[in-house]
Amino acid sequence: MDALLRPLEMKSEEAVKITERKEITEEKKGANTYTITAKEICEELARLFKLKYEIDGQLTLSFLRPFSDIDLKSMDWSLEIKDVPTNGLASSNMISFLIKEKGVEVGQWRVGIRCELWKEAFVARYAIARGKPIKESDFKGRLVEVMSLRKNIVPPSTDLKLFETTQSIPADGIFSWDEITKIPDVRNGEVVEIVAEEGLMRLATKGMALENGCKGDFIPVRNIQSGKNIQGQVVDEKTIKIHF
């Protein structure tokens, strides 16, 4: 999928710690110490990124390099993202964030993170040839990772039975908008009625559609009698309306 979200060039895969509070000594650790795990940090980063980019789906993050747990004195902590990819999230990113304890900054870190975005998608049950209307038996739903696909996948709310394939789709292939198109009401080369109306006056003649078109689309049509090409709006599968 085209980068939520183009990949950001990473200068290094090493996590670089920018600033840090003084190390908690072993004597201070114990009942009064709260540990923030790498998993908790990734979960909070994912939550904040979903809000920032209005991401739909299940977003999971992980560090590209091992990240040490952080020990605090209390559970009252918060995370703020400082540096974010300007073009949105990609499979791999460099980001900066800081952590606060009771509103006081503990430290800042610059790290590499890996992102996975899981969404429901349509998957072909078997190979589907190009130019075929899609039937309900042709596809099934599946949770897929889309961040690395570089495809604009068809959302599960789409009624696929209104579409046909524009290229062949292999078995288990994920449906994307590049591979399907809405079934046209009028097809290129079909004979249609060209209608022009103004007030009580109505003129009609035969024409030939020069492009596929769905209801409401404007397509070129040829007046068979005069041979002139004009633009008209698809009304239904047999009618093209000309606007004066």
Image (cartoon, rainbow, N blue to C red):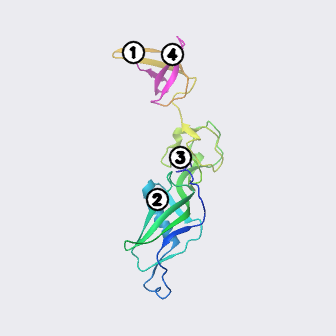
- Asked if the residue at tag 1 contacts the one at tag 3, i.e. Cβ–Cβ closer than 8 Å, the answer is no
Amino acid at pointer 2:
Phe
Do residues under tags 2 and 4 come within 8 Å of each other at their CB atoms? no
Q: Return the x and y of residue 33 as percentages of the image width and height.
A: 45, 82
Q: Which residue is denoted by mark 3 in the rendering? A: 154
Residue 187 placement, left or right of 76: right
Q: Amino acid at mark 3?
A: Val
Comparing labels 1 and 2, the label whose residue is closer to the camera = 2
Choose the circle earlier in sequence order: 3 or 2. 2
Q: Which residue is mark 2?
A: 49
Residue 206's label in the rendered image is 4
Between 49 and 24, the one lying in front of the other is: 24
Q: Secondary structure at mark 1?
A: strand
- Mark before the other along the chain sequence, 3 or 1: 3
The secondary structure that dominates the magenta segment is: strand
Q: CA distance from mark 4 to mark 1?
A: 14 Å
Q: Determine whether, in the image, residue 115 is placed left or right of residue 102.
A: right
Give residue 53's quadrant in the image: bottom left
